Amino acid sequence: MTDEKSQAPNDRVRVTWSAITKLMREMGPAVLEAIQHHAVQPLSTRIADLELQVAALRAEKSATFADAYRGLWMPGAFKRGDLVTADGSLWLALEDSKGKPGSDSAWRLVVKRGKDAKEAR
């Protein structure tokens, strides 16, 4: 670019390239510091927090239905997400419970028991 005057889009201010470069030299470090402090640093902190969360999630054992199935219901304590078979039906614990499936709102019926099948011949 040359040192010639250029007209701003709004027709109100005329500046020269040398005036712009002088202003950037004078204010540049302060502007960069402000950007670093108000934009880059918070984002860097947030990224670091998210990376820690991702690492923790990767370290946790992935839960599957096979992990959630506890077998036949027997009296005891069950955690939210546990699956049990009671009276031939499959039940899901919606919250921690010590009650029998179907006896309170802590359990949801997933699969209702069917009729006894005839013997295969």
Image (cartoon, rainbow, N blue to C red):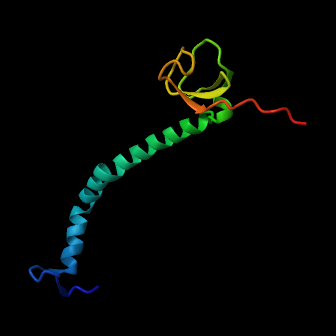
Kindly identify the residue that appears in the image at 64 percent across and 27 percent down: 89
Looking at the rendered structure, the number of numbered marks drawn on it comes to: 0
Q: Residue furthest right?
A: 121
Residue 73, placed above or below residue 58:
above
Residue 73, placed above or below residue 2:
above
Q: Residue furthest left?
A: 12
In the rendered image, which quarter is residue 32 located in?
Answer: bottom left
Assign the C terminus to one quadrant of the image. Answer: top right
Kindly identify the residue that appears in the image at 49 percent across and 23 percent down: 106
Q: Nearer the viewer, residue 14 or 2?
A: 14
Kindly identify the residue that appears in the image at 31 percent across and 52 percent down: 39
Horizontal side, residue 59 vs residue 26: left or right: right
Kindly identify the residue that appears in the image at 8 percent across and 80 percent down: 12
Q: Position of residue 4 (x, y in %)?
A: 20, 88
Horizontal side, residue 32 vs residue 47: left or right: left
Q: Position of residue 13 (x, y in %)?
A: 11, 79
Horizontal side, residue 85 vs residue 10: left or right: right
Residue 115, placed above or below residue 41:
above
Q: Position of residue 90 (x, y in %)?
A: 63, 29
Q: Residue furthest top?
A: 75
Q: Nearer the viewer, residue 23 or 34?
A: 34
